[in-house]
Amino acid sequence: MLKMAIPNKGALSEDAAVLLREAGYRCARSGRELVVSDRENEIDFVFLRPRDIALYVGNGILDLGITGRDLEQDSGADVREIMALEFGRSRFCFAVPKDSNLTVEKLAGLRIATSYPELLRRNLESRGLKGCRIVRLDGAVEISIRLGVADAIADVVESGATLKEAGLVTIGDPMLQSEAVLIGRSAELAETPEVRRILGRLKGVLLARTYAMMEYDVPRTQLEVACRITPGIESPTVAPLSNPDWVSVKAMVVRRECNRIMDELYDIGARGVIVADIRSCRL
């Protein structure tokens, strides 16, 4: 059986569990189990700290894992990113006191606090910033400057609200754009039938989150215009109604554009416009 690690707590854990359930896998814990076996799909889900997942996969103990790109790269483990999962997005950035006038170029020789020492070390080397002292912390990095432990920080930023509360601002371009990723112990693993099945299911769920199914009735005289508004993937499905002057149309549309499309359809005379979720799809 395949063995896949998933985060045991936090936002990554919740979103990973939802994605896997929607893809048809049984990974829900009833308590604090470390392993949940999905016999039907022949896969064991192992619950680990997000920071440890890449190490277990890299050492060949587990086949696959879901973790953050930032954690995977900081671990230095010999793993391959197989697929981006489109949740848990964040940026790894430098941050300094808002009134400090510090820039990235001025960080040479200063103390920089972080929970990602290897990721930071490699970035400092690539920039040629010498003499920096990396202060490793396991959490609450943003308070380290106020407490006199560091002059700047390097941390994962999502909304930026926590930094703002601490009186900090980001400087320079992000060192890394991170998100949840599926990793494997080798690139060749992604070509095996078992893993290809997993990838197909996950891609189907992620694709379905991008689209919605729109159905509506429209006068035949406006059908050509309606099909231009909702062209679908190949073409929309058109079916006759009992009233020969009207037809029913069904098409996939980009979810974020649903309201605009509904407005345009209504303006040309379409009625009974309905938008439905798609749980999974393959294109």
Image (cartoon, rainbow, N blue to C red):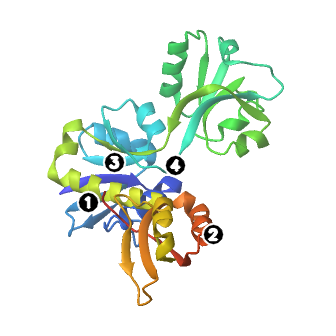
Q: Please tell me the numbered disc located at residue 65.
A: 3
Nearer the observer, 191 or 264 = 264
Q: Please tell me the numbered disc located at residue 163.
A: none
- The residue positioned 35% from the left and 65% from the top of the image is 27
Could you tell me which quadrant the N terminus lies in?
bottom left
Q: Earlier in the sequence, mark 2 or mark 1?
A: 1
Could you tell me which quadrant the C terminus lies in?
bottom left
Numbered disc in front, either 4 or 2: 2
Q: CA distance from mark 2 to mark 3?
A: 48 Å
Q: Earlier in the sequence, mark 4 or mark 3?
A: 3
Residue under pointer 1: 44
Residue under pointer 4: 88
Q: Secondary structure at mark 3?
A: strand
Which residue appears farthest toward the right when viewing the image?
99
Which amino acid type corresponds to the residue marked 1 in the rendered image?
A: Asp
Q: Quadrant location of residue 149?
A: top right
Q: CA distance from mark 4 to mark 3?
A: 15 Å
Crowd rating for badge 1 (residues with CA inside 10 Å; few <14, some 14–19, many 20+): some
Q: Is residue 197 above or below residue 217?
A: above
Q: Earlier in the sequence, mark 1 or mark 4?
A: 1
Which residue appears farthest toward the bottom when viewing the image?
242
Crowd rating for badge 2 (residues with CA inside 10 Å; few <14, some 14–19, many 20+): few
- The percent position of residue 244, horizontal first and vertical second, equals 42, 86
Nearer the observer, 234 or 93 = 234
- The percent position of residue 140, horizontal first and vertical second, equals 66, 41
